[in-house]
Image: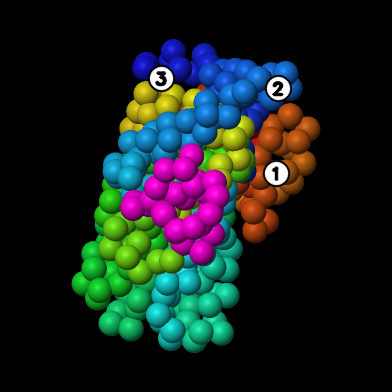
């Protein structure tokens, strides 16, 4: 689908520069949710249809990050998907994490301290050099939530492989605008309510086969069964043979929306979205006299910025005392200029 045509499927109010907090639904997502809510309200039997959207979402996510759909588990949050990965670490393991890391990709490792798991935090720019023979796993956000910095994915993977370490990537702030090969990592987890523009409550985790062999599906329920519809009652344990054994029962309406959202992004193509998003981010930076970058998320330190943007009706975020602006497929040049006029006027 042509990006210009696709952009007509969104109808945001002017001034939304906050996708790094949450993404906005396109018309197909909104319509799918309204239909499902109508079915729920009327008591129409649509459960199997709603469940089917989970596998549609799984397939679309796999397509977006270049992994097999059978290696993708579905859940509700990044930390929930990472929990069995953290629990599978051997006692006394060492995990290396950037020092300014979103806590959903930090707390799951820290809570393993009672088993002797050590978490070493280092500056992002020093992450590659910090990976050594003592490292069991390196965990990092592909794009940092706080400031939009892009981690050196290839270099981190190469360093980890050289020392036999596992690689776990939180791609929540990347997936949907930044192309990358998820299969190079051992785990890739994504909360879908930001750049994937799905409802909050849908999350995806690529779990490589060699990692799954170490993991135990402690949260297994009926949806993790080999045949979920034959897994309602009684033993024996009969879990799926692939990553679905780590599924949790899906929040139906989240996945109804996610299927439509992810399929649309896959149809548009992430490279085209990246070019659009980064061009707008650089228009914003250039307008403030800053050098251009490569990220769809930027932070700026402008006196009184929050108040100036609020008066102009621009919605952005403040992180670590700096304004964080983020740009996505539905952002326009007019949105950028509205923000620039507010900050420089």
| Mark closest to the chain's N terminus, 2 or 3 | 3
Snapshot quadrant of residue 279: top left
Counting from the top left corner in percent of width and height, residue 81 is at 50, 56
Helix, strand or loop at label 2? It is: loop
Q: Which residues are magenta?
A: 217-244
Q: In the rendered image of this protein, does residue 240 appear above or below residue 175?
A: below
State the residue in front, 201 or 49: 49
**Residue marked by disc 3:** 3
Q: Predominant secondary structure in magenta?
A: loop
Magenta-span inclusion, residue 223: yes
Q: Are marks 1 and 3 in contact (CB under 8 Å)?
A: no
Q: CA distance from mark 2 to mark 3?
A: 37 Å
Residue 242 visible in the shown view = yes
Q: Which residue corresponds to the image point at 36% horizontal and 17% vertical from the top-left? A: 1
User: Which residue matches tag 1?
Assistant: 305
Circles 2, 3 touching at the beta carbon (< 8 Å): no
Q: In whole angstroms, how far apart are the C-alphas of marks 1 and 2? A: 49 Å
Residue 43 numbered mark, or none: 2
Mark count:
3
């Amino acid at each position: 689908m042509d990006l210009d045509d696709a952009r007509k499927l969104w109808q945001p109010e002017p001034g939304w520069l906050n996708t790094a907090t949450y993404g906005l639904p396109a018309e197909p997502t909104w319509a799918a949710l309204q239909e499902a809510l109508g079915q729920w309200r009327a008591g129409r039997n649509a459960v199997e249809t709603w469940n089917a959207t989970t596998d549609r979402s799984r397939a679309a996510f796999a397509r977006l990050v270049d992994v097999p759909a059978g290696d993708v588990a579905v859940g509700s949050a990044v930390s929930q998907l990472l929990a069995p990965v953290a629990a599978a670490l051997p006692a006394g393991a060492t995990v290396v994490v950037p020092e300014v890391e979103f806590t959903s990709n930090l707390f799951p490792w820290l809570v393993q301290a009672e088993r002797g798991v050590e978490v070493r935090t280092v500056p992002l720019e020093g992450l590659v050099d910090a990976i050594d023979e003592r490292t069991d796993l390196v965990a990092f956000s592909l794009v940092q939530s706080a400031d939009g910095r892009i981690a050196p994915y290839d270099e981190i993977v190469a360093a980890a492989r050289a020392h036999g370490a596992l690689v776990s990537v939180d791609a929540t702030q990347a997936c949907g605008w930044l192309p990358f090969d998820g299969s190079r990592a051992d785990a890739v987890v994504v909360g879908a309510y930001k750049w994937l523009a799905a409802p909050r409550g849908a999350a995806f985790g690529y779990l490589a086969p060699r990692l799954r062999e170490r993991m135990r599906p402690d949260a297994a329920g009926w949806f993790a069964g080999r045949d979920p519809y034959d897994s309602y009652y009684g033993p024996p344990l009969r879990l799926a043979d692939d990553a679905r054994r780590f599924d949790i029962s899906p929040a139906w309406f989240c996945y109804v929306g996610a299927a439509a959202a992810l399929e649309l992004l896959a149809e548009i193509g992430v490279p085209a979205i990246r070019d659009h998003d980064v061009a707008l981010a650089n228009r914003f930076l250039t307008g403030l006299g800053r050098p251009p970058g490569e990220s769809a998320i930027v932070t700026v330190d402008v006196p009184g910025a929050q108040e100036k943007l609020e008066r102009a009706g621009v919605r952005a975020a403040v992180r670590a005392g700096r304004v964080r602006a983020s740009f996505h497929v539905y952002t326009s040049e007019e949105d950028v200029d509205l923000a620039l006029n507010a900050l420089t006027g």
